[in-house]
Image (spheres, rainbow, N blue to C red):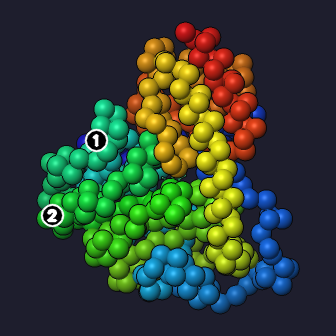
Amino acid sequence: MTTRRADGSEYMEWAKTRSQARFNLASSGVAELPTSELPIRLEDVELTGPSFYGYPPLQERLAKKAGVGPECVVAATGTSMANYLALAAFLEPGDEALVEEPTYGPLVDAASYLGAEIRRFPRRAEDAFAIDPDRVESALTARTRLVVLSNLHNPSNALVGEEAMRRIGDRAGRVGARVLVDEVYLDALFERAPRSAFALDPERFVITSSLTKAYGLGGLRCGWIVADPSSARRMWRLNDLFGVVPAHAAEKLSIVALDHLAPIAARAKALLDGNRATLQRFFDGRAELEVPRLQAGMIAFPRLRRGRVDALCAVLREKHDTTVVPGRFFGMSDHFRVSYGCRPETLAGGLEALGAALNEIA
Ligand SMILES: Cc1ncc(COP(=O)(O)O)c(C=O)c1O
C-alpha cells in the first residue's frame, strides 16, 4: 500500500521534458492527423457557444459513438481530465483505490493526489499481463471504493476480454466498489474492438476515453466519461471546480472529426498495420528481447533479457537521438515501452537506432 500523497506525475514530467527526440518511440498514439486532412470550413469554428453541462451537438455524437444516452456522457479535456473527474467522483480521502500494476502513472498519481490509499493488484509479465480476477478479489477490502485498470493495457497492450471483465465487476460488486476502465486504447482494435465495459454493467463500470490515441487527434483534447446518469451528474458538478467549460472551438472541431471518423480510423489502421509488421520483423531478429507476438494496438513492452534498460535508454538518447519509455515508470526496470503509432520513417530510424544501441550495450 502506498500512502505518500502524489504532488504531480513523474512520468508526465518526463514525457513532457525528456521524451522528445528525432526518433520518438516513447509517445504513444497514432501520428497526428494533419489539420489539412480534417474537412473544416471556417464557419465550422466558433469561439463561443452554448456549452454548459456539455455542448448538445457534441454530447449527441459522443453518446452515439458510445451507444448510450447523452445523460451518461461527460465530455472532458482528454482522457486525462476524464480520468481525474471519474476518480474524484468516487474517491474520498482515506478510501482505497485498487489499481492494476503496472499501469499508466497518472492514474495512480491522480488517485493518490485525491487522498486515496493506493493498493495494487498485479498483472504479471509471465501471464502476458492478463488480469486474474482472483488476484483482484484477494486485494479488495471493505474500504475499496474503486478498482482501476486500462484496456487495452498500458504498457503491455494486453486485452481484458469480456468474461474476465465481467468477473472483475462481480468481485468489485461484492464490496460495493466501482470499476474504472481507461479505454483510451480500445478503439485501436478498430472493427475487432469488443464492447465497452460499460455495456456489461452500467451500474458497476465507468469508462474513460478520447480521440487521442487511435485517431491521431490528441490536439483536440476530445475526451469523455461514460457513467450511470447520477454519477455523470456528479462529475459535471465537479467539473465546475476544474475546467468549468471547454474551448468551444475545440468542441466544434471535435464534431467535424466525429462526423468523419471512418476515414480517420482507416488512415490510423493502415499506419498501425504497416508499422506493426515492421516492428514484429525487428523483434523476430532480436533474441535478447522477450515480447509476445504483436497482434493489435500501438504499444509493445519488451523485456530485456540481458543488460540494463537504463543503460540502453541512455545510449539511445545520447548517441542516437531516440527515445523509448524506460520500464521504471511502470515499476518494471527490465522492460521498456515502444510505441509504433509514429510515421513509418520515424519507426524505421528508431528501430535502426534501437538495434545499434542493443548491440552497444551487449
Ligand atoms: C492509459 C492512458 N490514459 C490516458 C492517457 C491520456 O490521454 P489523453 O491524451 O486523451 O488525455 C494516456 C496517454 O498516454 C494513456 O496512456
| Identity, as a three-letter code, of the amino acid under mark 1 | Pro
Q: Residue at x 60, y 39 (%)?
A: 277
User: What quarter of the picture does the C terminus occupy?
Assistant: top right
In the picture, measured across the screen, residue 81 lies left or right of residue 114, that is right
Label 1 Cα neighbours within 10 Å, binned few <14 / some 14-19 / many ≥20: some
User: What quarter of the picture does the N terminus occupy?
Assistant: top left
Q: Does dot 1 land on a helix, a strand or a loop?
A: strand
In the picture, measured across the screen, residue 210 lies left or right of residue 21, that is left
Q: Give the image location of residue 124, x and y in percent.
A: 31, 37
What residue is shown with label 1? Answer: 122
Q: Quadrant of residue 78?
A: bottom right
In the picture, measured across the screen, residue 298 lies left or right of residue 218, that is left
Q: Is residue 122 above or below residue 246?
A: above
Q: Residue at x 79, y 82 (%)?
A: 44
Q: Residue at x 54, y 28 (%)?
A: 283
Q: Is residue 169 above or below residue 326?
A: below
What residue is shown with label 2? Answer: 175
* Ligand 1 is within 8 Å of the C-beta of the residue at disc 2: no
